[in-house]
């Protein structure tokens, strides 16, 4: 009877260890996906910051910051110019200044994309 009891205790410990390992793996994988989602805006945010800095350096920021960015149907309009974009489902409308603030301070990916679409090459 003691051997059977020891065998059951051993099996229970192994089962608990396996459960703990599975929980840890699930937690790590969920955190990894959160990190990868959080880094999506970094390239757009960096590019948007660079583009806005160029406007400021050329003295154009004050005159352009109140202009509206309007994107839909595969194109974006800004300051009288229309640019085709490769995302036909992207829609956005806000001023350049608001888009910049949302991009930098709120990590809003759409705002960053809109800035890059209208000010980028």
Image: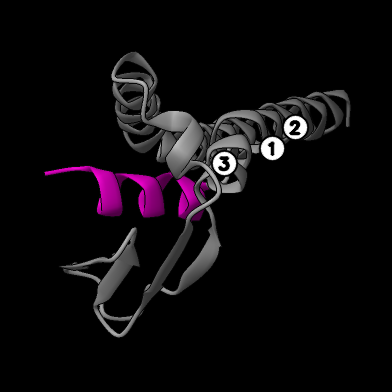
Label placed on residue 16: 2
Left or right placement of residue 53 versus residue 67 in this view = left
Q: Can you tell which quarter of the image residue 119 is in? A: top left
Residue closest to the far top: 57
Give me the residue at 52% from left, 68% from top. Answer: 93
Please determine whether, in this image, residue 12 is positioned above or below residue 120. above
How far apart in space, not on screen, are marks 1 and 2 (Cα)? 5 Å
Quarter that holds the C terminus: top left
Of the residues under marks 2 and 3, which one precedes in the sequence? 2
Give me the residue at 35% from left, 37% from top. Answer: 44
Give me the residue at 28% from left, 19% from top. Answer: 58
Left or right placement of residue 73 versus residue 24 in this view = left
Residue closest to the far left: 121
Q: Can you tell which quarter of the image residue 47 is in? A: top left
How far apart in space, not on screen, are marks 1 and 3 (Cα)? 51 Å
Quarter that holds the N terminus: top right
Mark 1: which secondary structure?
helix
Please give the residue where the numbered disc 3 appears in the rendered image: 97
Left or right placement of residue 120 versus residue 116 in this view = left
How far apart in space, not on screen, are marks 2 and 3 (Cα)? 55 Å
For the residues labelled 1 and 2, say whether their Cβ atoms are less than 8 Å apart.
yes
Q: Label 1 neighbourhood size at 10 Å, few (<14), some (14-19), many (20+)?
A: few
For the residues labelled 2 and 3, say whether their Cβ atoms are less than 8 Å apart.
no
Mark 2: which secondary structure?
helix
Label placed on residue 49: none
Please give the residue where the numbered disc 1 appears in the rendered image: 19
Relative image position of residue 17 (x, y in whole percent): 68, 26
Of the residues under marks 1 and 3, which one precedes in the sequence? 1
Give me the residue at 62% from left, 42% from top. Answer: 102
- What segment is highlighted magenta in the picture? 109-121
């Amino acid at each position: 009877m003691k051997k059977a009891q020891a065998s059951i205790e051993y099996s229970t410990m192994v089962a608990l260890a396996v459960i703990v390992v599975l929980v840890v793996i699930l937690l790590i994988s969920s955190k990894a996906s959160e990190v990868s989602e959080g880094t999506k805006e970094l390239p757009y945010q960096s590019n948007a910051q660079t583009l806005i800095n160029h406007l400021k350096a050329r003295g154009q920021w004050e005159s352009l910051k109140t202009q509206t960015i309007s994107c839909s149907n595969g194109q974006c309009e800004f300051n009288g110019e229309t640019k085709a974009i490769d995302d036909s489902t992207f829609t956005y409308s806000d001023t350049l200044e608001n888009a910049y603030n949302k991009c930098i301070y709120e990590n809003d990916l759409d705002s960053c994309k809109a800035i890059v679409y209208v000010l980028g090459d």
